[in-house]
Amino acid sequence: MNNERFTAYYKAQNIIPDEDWDHFMNALRLPLPTTFRVAGSRETAHVLNNAIEETYVPLLSGAEFEGEQVPPPSQLPWYPEGLAWQFNVSKKVLRKSVEFKKFHSFLVFETEVGNISRQEAVSMIPPLLLDVQPYHKVIDMCAAPGSKTAQLLEALHAQDTATSTSTPPGLLIANDSDGKRAHLLIHQSARLPSPAFMVTNLDASIYPILRLPNTESEIHRVKKTSNQLLFDRILCDVPCSGDGTLRKNVGIWKRWQPMDGNGLHSLQVRILQRAMRMLEDDGRIVYSTCSLNPVENEAVIAAALNSNPGKFSFELVDVSDQLPQLLRRPGISAWTPTVDRSINTTFRTWDDFVQSLPESKRLESKISESHWPPSNAESLRLQRCLRIYPHLQDTGGFFVAVLQKKQSCDVGLSTQISTKREAEEFINHAPETKKAKLESEEVNPHNPVISDIEDVLSSVTAPASVGKETKKLSTERVLDEKAKSSGGSNKDSPHDSSFKEMPYTFLTPDDTTLQSCIAQLSFTSEFPSSNVLVRNPTGEAARSLYLTNDLVKEVVRSNDYTRMRLLTCGTKVVTKQEAGKGMDAQFRILGEGLPAVLPYASPGLILTTELATLKILLETYYPLCTGFAEPFRSAIEAKNTGSHIVRFPAGSSSEATNLSHDLVLPLWKSNVSVSLMIDKKAKSALSLRLFGEDITSAAREAAQKKTLLAEKLPLNDHQMEEDLSQNE
């Protein structure tokens, strides 16, 4: 855990005072503590948090391993509402200590069902500073693997209850340029089903303009204009060299060299500039890296601010009063980049470096002027950035900057009114059937539709010395955005033939299959049937039905799905099971979709019972209806075959627990038996939480296999000895 180049480079940057240097380096060599946060709706999160405080912390407080006391989990002091935790034990302790093994099983199961997110402490900071509200339009530009995306989703769903998902008027687009990593985001989203969620697979630095439907301008009633989708909140957690993660990625010690950061600088600038062009007035961008390198941090912020063409005004936000217990250091205004692997930091300015090169080599250099501090570095208030160092609070290294787009003085009043109205309607629980106003009807003169090549070029201005690769990307962006400038209809969009995902097609409210589904599942008349979609080009309601909110629907219908490279949209709520000849198809509510459709479930669909019923459902795969106690037995026998919902009300108790809030689960009834329609891991997590042990059928089978294996091993060893003696 030593790298002379690392030491020489960061000592030259003066990011750490001399008296703290050894403390800083020693902290980098220590293993990183395990951190996690309690996720999901606030109601559910607090219930689970109380369980950790009241059950596991006392259990682990006196734990010892090999004669040494092991510290119990402790709350991160700066995380809101105490919902984030940290513990520092080795894998050996987790595997062999009885107390910690039980706690580890609890963490694993609750993580699987989405109630706990294993996440590095510093990674939790950017979403908190983004300050997302349910009515915001949000994009996470480099989202994979998705821990920050999950935080943003939770903020968007601040009005969720423990049992049902709200339908926020805003949206969250999670994007990643890597296809495989982008698909991880789909798995992450299933833990918090959201009608307001989309996943795209695009290069963040050339993210295309997305459109909302054409609207008639109040000023030019004859001419129709196409509205660009602008975002209220943008997260740019950009690709970086990652030297802030040395504590968990030990291999970086050996391979670290400063040219990694130098090479990423221009990409980071382009991503941030693209975000600035996609931001609504008064919107906020959070830029972050897990790097300590000022070339990837303050230099990027300065370059983006200085490359602003002048139509828009951005400033760094002072967040010193937020998360007050988080120890941080201010951003720096002076640094000295190195120009080669040998840590040559002798060039104090860009001009000094250029003059040292032969004229024939100057255009080939990948080092740009924006690698150095600009002359106006002090006036940019770079000290408002946050630098997180490992020795301050036992974390990884991290950098965060919060930028805000200043609202222009002549912005349309209708935009302000529209946003305020959406917020008030949501807070007052306006029904989803009442369509929220998506955009102001008045054209915002400060977010004009890009109408010519010059405007496009000015919208993607890059540092003056960015090389040929950047110019090529800019040209692609010009062609892409020019093709969309005439309007938002799919027929005007360039179709990406390389994109092989199935399209999303909205069903008409009177679709016979959809109407059959609504009738069979007894959904109320408030069910948003106009927001149901399927994944196929013909619009046939084949298997799975997805649900979105109004805004996501407008985005999907106004943009070509291949151009967006749309991987997922809304949340899957219902699946269709084909029946035999002469029989109607059966529809089943999915476990992941239940919270989204629960507000539209009629009382007749929901069976109310006690925890004793749940215990039977967990202990047996397909318990017979006759095996339940009354009154549940009569109630379930009277129901038709198909999908139902079972509710265990708050206050339901067993010998082990007492429910603090309603528990609602999907149920399937066959002719003579019933089945709880959640997966094995979710059942195990539920069992551990409610009964203190895993009583599920799957757990018993696993235990039996383990016992059989243990019994066979000695026999095999004995047989091996006999075979050996015979051979001798």
Image (spheres, helix red, strand yellow):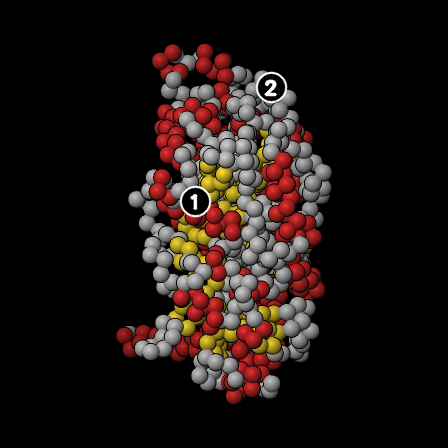
Across and down, in percent, residue 16 comes to: 63, 31
Please name the amino acid that badge 1 sits on.
Ser
Rendering quarter of residue 457: top left
* Disc 1, SS: helix
* Mark drawn on residue 35: none
The front one of 73 and 407 is 407
**Is 356 displayed left or right of 54 in the figure?**
left
Quarter the C terminus occupies: bottom left
Q: Work out whether 265 lies above or below 561.
A: above
Q: What x and y, as percent, mark residue 708?
A: 43, 78
For disc 1, the marked residue is 558
Q: Nearer the viewer, residue 675 or 495?
A: 495
Most foreground residue, 320 or 34: 320
Q: What label does residue 376 carry, if any? A: 2
Q: In the image, 202: left or right of 57? A: left
Q: Residue furthest left?
A: 727
User: In the image, what residue occupies the spot 38% across and 75% down?
Assistant: 584
Q: Residue at x 42, y 55 (%)?
A: 506
Task: Say which of marks 2 and 1 sits in front.
Answer: 1
| Amino acid of disc 2 | Asn
Q: Position of residue 147 (x, y in %)?
A: 53, 50
Residue at (59, 29) in percent of width and height: 314
**Can residue 171 be seen?**
yes
Spatial CA distance of label 2 from label 1 is 42 Å
- Residue for point 40% across, 16% down: 362
Which residue of the protein is positioned furthest toward the front in this rendering? 222
Alpha-carbon neighbours of circle 1 within 10 Å: few (<14), some, or many (≥20)? many
* Residue 525 x %, y %: 54, 65
Judged from the image, the secondary structure of the residue bearing numbered disc 2 is loop
State the count of labels: 2
Judge whether residue 57 can be spotted in this image: no
Q: Earlier in the sequence, mark 2 or mark 1?
A: 2
